Image (cartoon, rainbow, N blue to C red):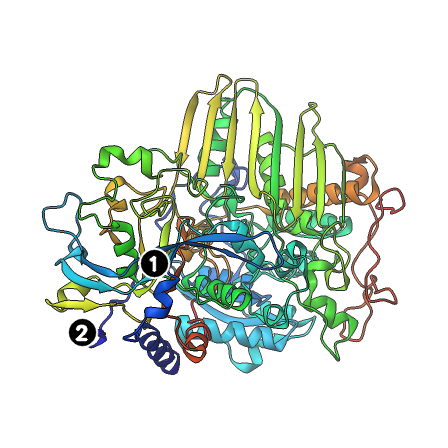
Amino acid sequence: MRSITLLIKTTCIGLMLIPATIFSQENNFRNYTQELQGTDLKFDMIAIQGGEFMMGSPVTEAGRHEDEGPQHKVQISPFWMSKFEVTWDLYEPFVYKNQETRISKTALSQEVDALTRPTKPYVDMTWGMGKEGFPAIGMTQYSAIQFCKWLYTRTGEFYRLPTEAEWEYACRAGTAGPYSFGKSENINEYAWYKLNSDNKTHPVGSKKPNPWGLYDMHGNVTEWTIDQYVANLYSKRSTGLSKDPFIPTETLYPHSVRGGSYEDEVKDLRSASRRGSDPQWKVIDPQIPKSNWWLTGGTFVGIRLVRPLIKPSKEEIEAYFNIEPIPDF
Amino acid sequence: MNLYLISKNIPMNNKNNELNERRDFIKTSAILTGGALLSSIPLAGAYASGSDTIKIALIGCGSRGTGAAFQALSTKFNLKLVAMADAFPDKLEKSHKSLLAKFGAEKISVPEDKKFTGFDGYKSAMEDADVVLLCTPPGFRPVHFAEAVKQNKQIFMEKPVATDSPGIRSVLATAEEAKRKKLNVVVGLQRHYQKNYRELIKRVHQGELGDIISGQVYWNSGGVWVNPRQPNQTEMEYQMRNWYYFNWLCGDHIVEQHVHNIDVANWVKNKYPVSAYGAGGRFLRTGKDYGEIFDNHSIEFVYDDGTVISSQCRHFTGGANRVDESFQGTKGKIFLDSSNRGKIWDHKGKVLVNYEGKNDANPYQTEHDELFAAITANQYKFADAENAAKSTMTAIMGRYASYSGDVIKWDDALNSNINLMPDRLAWDALPKILPNFDGTYPHAIPGVTKVI
């Protein structure tokens, strides 16, 4: 356990180190579409310029929780973020190798063939809410990270989960209020949430995007971040400038998810709103040990991808991915 | 980097062990009604004899059996696990390790000589227990259930309860014996212990939808685990390790998995179908790792009043999934699924009931909460075995229909003498189903295969 923790911590520290010179990469820093060679699968990535923002919410913000303060200044290095939440179209070929083989025009590489895949879920993890074009849901954070490894193995590019800070920076997209779309009255144009979702997920990108072109940052599914969730985190942060902050994993619960979901109230979709993962999300898993891969009750959790502008070394990337799941029962 | 600012004292979440609230007693087909419920009946089991600790034995220590033991030990009652049995020592040890880590040596009191492996260990493992948890692959259930009732044990057993007709007839006979002995029997058709199903089906039985005249039930998902053959395995060990794909152990997924939804149809109709007709096959999940079972079945079940319930189950990746049940009545329609949801509409589409049980109790826990509450109170309250046998039979009848291509009648299906179980259970014995020269297995061919 200890060695796993240390590995993760060391890895994450390594990943976040940003070289001083990034000129060559910045020349190519624009939106792009990532294709998965030999298949029809692809996804869009939006270039997010680096910058500074105020993380957290002011005490005056309606619906605010204590864990959103105090506000503090954070500096974020440039990265790409997926335009949409990851859909089942992309996630299912990772879960089922036979499905990946079936949709591939060429044989799977030895590396892809050898990857560790999720256990096949006994229940229907879409819960009948929809598959094609709908956000993938119910995966554990470990599973989400292994999905990124699958993408890395297929594409050679380093995809990972966002940090809480990157997520909030991208969600705000330069705005300082509770929502990137201004007043909560506008919500029906921008987000799926409790009162308009009919209690289910919806196809990604079926509402309007935020100012930086990212869809469904508010609502639809709440999105995994890298960070361990620490309620009183902000009060411990520097009053000066925090640069690319994040909290490495020490325990299986709680990890931070952001953005709220189709089953949340409007206030829980705010840019600053934070939530920790909970063992309750697995409570209806009838098996022991409980799955390392699936949240049988986590029908509202999904994935947003990030790719840092500066690619870490191969060793750092492999150390990030090659983690053991923390046992859960 | 500002990692140095982060406290090491990250709060742990400790909600996970909260006991579920005791559910109100709701009458369903799963629970005895009227005069059968007598709180003062002395129980046949050893529990009545003085000790306030209920001793349980786990028969079948896979991940589901281990889960069932976790749930039993997570009830508010004073339980102790005293014996375990599994065909495989490694499965038993893994299970024991998890249980010990979670509940400690006082509650997990299973010395080495109370760990029983091989095919016959179940008998000895039951001896010291008041309550037994029967969680092996379903092919063994008829024999284990019979032994448990013979030994006067209270019983939790997983679904399905058999894989062939002789097995069903055995379970039906044992169910009668269990009733005669007033032994509580809870079966893990956990929708019977889930509030949305209980509440909304109660409304159906009260006539809110009029007469139910049609329905659709589904388990369309991506399929389950597979354990490929390993070197040095005997044929028996291989089939036991990869049991999902062999009918004598599993019954095919229409039985092992889809029985849940078929059982809901029977529950809503409050009866069992008189015939089945349909189709099925092996389309995508072929190859030597996948034994003999089909990857899809599409069956129409006909009831004596002419009601047709259509049933689909498939193990396909890709495409749209659904695992749920819908029924249409003369006055309205209903939708149910296992994520604690349910909806009732009138025929104009107006929503009459929109049940959202987001925080409802976990039904896998509720079935143990209610069983052990009854046992602790010396009550005879649960006789789930007969319905479980008949719903399992319904699913087997569906398999007979897809395997044979014929119209299968209930009485013929129930009386079939085709026995799938091996003549002898031992690691060096041969199951009846054996591989072809290329390692694949023969499977049913509609129009050729005989099921009756």
Task: State the quadrant of the N terminus of chain B.
Answer: bottom left
Element type where label 2 sits in the image: helix
Residue A323 seen in the current view = no
Q: Looking at the image, can residue A167 be seen? A: yes
Q: Which quadrant holds residue A269?
A: top left
Residue B5 badge: 2
Question: Residue at position x 83%, y 43% from top?
Answer: B404
Q: Residue at (59%, 66%) from the top-left corner?
A: B59
Residue toward you, B332 or A108: A108
Asked whether, in this view, residue B405 is left or right of residue B160, the answer is right
Q: Closest to the observer: A273 or A304?
A: A304
Residue B286 rendering spot, x and y as whole percentages: 75, 56
How far apart marks 2 and 1 lie (CA) works out to 24 Å
In the image, residue B426 lies at what x, y percent?
Answer: 76, 73
Q: Position of residue B73 (x, y in %)?
A: 43, 63
The secondary element bearing badge 1 is classed as loop
What x and y, as percent, mark residue A239?
A: 10, 66
Residue A199, above or below B124: above
Badge 1 density bin: few <14, some 14–19, many ≥20, Cα 10 Å: many
Q: Quadrant of residue A81?
A: bottom left
Residue to which mark 1 is pinned:
A278
In this view, the mark in front (2 or 1): 2
The image quarter in which residue A119 lies? bottom right
Give the left or right position of residue B303, taking residue B215 as reference.
right
Image quadrant containing the C terminus of chain B = top right
